[in-house]
Amino acid sequence: MMRPKAKSLLVFIISFIFGGSFSLCLAYEENLNIARTNLSILNCEEVKNRINTMLELHYQYDHFTDELFSRTMNKFSESLDQNRIYLLKSDIEYFSNKSKYYLSIFSNNNCNFITDFYKLFLKKVQERKNIINKILTNIDKKNEVEYFSIKKNSWAKNYTELYSNLKRRLKYQYLKELNTNKNIDAKNIIAKKYLKLEKEKLTIDNDKLFGTFLNSFALSLDPHSAHLLPNEHDSFVIHISNKLEGIGAQLIEKDGEIYIKSLINGGVAQKDGRIKPNDKILAVDPGNGIGLQELSDADVEKAVSLIRGKKGSSLKIYLQRSTTKGSEKFTVSLQRDEIELKDDKVKSALIDLQSTKIGVIKISTFYTDIKCKIRLLETCKGVAYDTEKELTKLIDNGAKGVVIDLRNNGGGDFPESIKLTGLFIPKGTIVQTLDKYHNLKKYNVEQNPWIYKGPLIVLVNHFSASASEIFSAAIQDYGRGIIVGDKKTYGKGTIQIVQEIPGTFGRKTDGALKVTQSKFYRVTGKSNQMLGVETNINLPSIQETFDTGEENQDYALPFDSIQPVPDFKPIKNNSSLIDKLKILSSKRISINEKYNLILNKIKHFNLGKSTLIPILSTNLKTIEDYINAKDIDDDSDEENNKILADKDLQLFESLLIMKDIVNLPNENWVSYTPKK
């Protein structure tokens, strides 16, 4: 196959910016024969070509070195053995220590070391069955208190250590199942889960195995590069565009069967009305000539790939529904369509706090219209376009201040973050980027009639990343608003390009390469990489205790800084205002019983952060209940505010801080005049 760079490519710049006896048994053949057909996408030569292309594109690396090989084998091991219950440290080191030899044969299109490692892994999977059976048989909820690490485990050095780790994991899973329902047969449920996991490991095909290795290589470069197989690329495009082509059904797997989990509001299936949640999918005819495909003992990934398809195409779904009279089987024929994912679309609400109206805008992801972007001279919709509509609606209805909620927003489209910032800043540089060739580029908003000039708060947490950090940093640096929430954001300061690989054998695509190509910097010259955006006012949450920031990711690129933008000048100095607001907020939190419960849990987590914590204390729910869009004229404000105060302490305190800003005297915020 041709190297990806030699093909016609579609490139997007994005910022993207998991008491009886029990037996696990599945057949295993020593002579491994990985499924391969003439329609396979990947072979050894193509694996090498894709690796070379990633190296040509990457911000930091140019060659497949011994170090990168060792990193790749570590990530390959993690991909196969996510919970580190099958492989030992010595298994990985055996292959890593022979990096020079494997790299030399790899250069000659020999990938035997990949299949050899997979054979070793499958052998370990078979060997661990007896251990799992033995532990499950002897588990007792009255046993001594077990502990389970909240940090990622290291690879076990020997069999004894692996047995101990597996025993703790199984005990945790057992207690968790019992906590859900004390009357269930928890041991059999866990046994079935491990049997399913074993089957998944034993039935990896050629493309999946080589694709896993390629993604492991991408992750050896940095945490945000990735190799995407066609179905993974489809999911990525759906995420970034906030749209899908299909029928709008979300699926779930239960005991080897595929069920309808829910229907997307406004989707084909929901409008049709015949398909209901909890219907079992028996088979699918995707309408592409391959005929009826049974889904018994299939996985969700396969089911999704059959149901998704081009807008206007037809499919048949064979279903079974349980009723009070028994079960009925029926067939539904549908025509696929483009469906907007409304759950992730920008939402807004107007909150009335004792006669002070405050607007809340929830932005879950930085989506964009990808299809529109490749058309010239056309205004494209996306997060900035939708936010402008909601912002105008809020202000026209009397909002005195606005809170932008970016919690758990992991990023998305890079240009959308620039457009969004332009709604709040009149002109100037928003962000700077630097590529591997040291080319510096400034991204500006030109003089514009900025939509909103009043008080602004940006609410973030530890999972606000990438494009969220570009927006938050610019708002903070210009003094345009105040950042509140967890101590800091995620700390992702890199930008990826996505290089789509055109399809062969009638496929729409043969996958894509997502590669880190540049780093971004604030107007001050400071990078968000590792550090994130520090909040002006800390509103603690459980998320602060999680080791999930960029600084905790393997092979993250280092922090650095560049020169500030020469003509940068803040709009406003908020330091004295922030000092006043901190005092007022701190007093409220100190007497808030619910918030103090959270603070005590945070202390508990922090004490156990570097060691082990009691297993029975891990069943904690995060304090989040994002506000839903509600009619602007809704008259149940008092009731809604009470629910909000109980369910989402961070957001409610953000609203109270905004109320303080609005009511503090002598704060010079430019007023807003609604459009006529």
Image (spheres, helix red, strand yellow):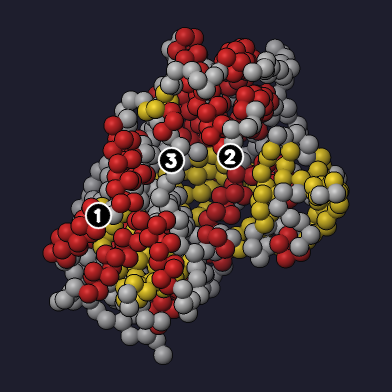
Circles 2 and 1: CB atoms closer than 8 Å: no
Give the alpha-carbon distance from disc 3 to disc 2, as whole Å: 48 Å
Is residue 552 in sight in this rendering?
A: yes
Q: Give the x, y percent position of residue 658.
A: 28, 68
Residue at 40%, 57% (x, y): give it: 646
User: Label 1 neighbourhood size at 10 Å, few (<14), some (14-19), many (20+)?
Assistant: few
First in sequence: mark 1 or mark 3? 1
First in sequence: mark 3 or mark 2? 2
Q: Amino acid at mark 3?
A: Leu
First in sequence: mark 2 or mark 1? 2
Give the alpha-carbon distance from disc 2 to disc 1, as whole Å: 63 Å
Residue at 59%, 32% (x, y): give it: 182
| Residue that carries the numbered disc 2 in the rendered image | 3
Circles 3 and 2: CB atoms closer than 8 Å: no
Give the alpha-carbon distance from disc 1 to disc 3, as whole Å: 22 Å
| Residue that carries the numbered disc 3 in the rendered image | 620
Image mark for residue 591: 1
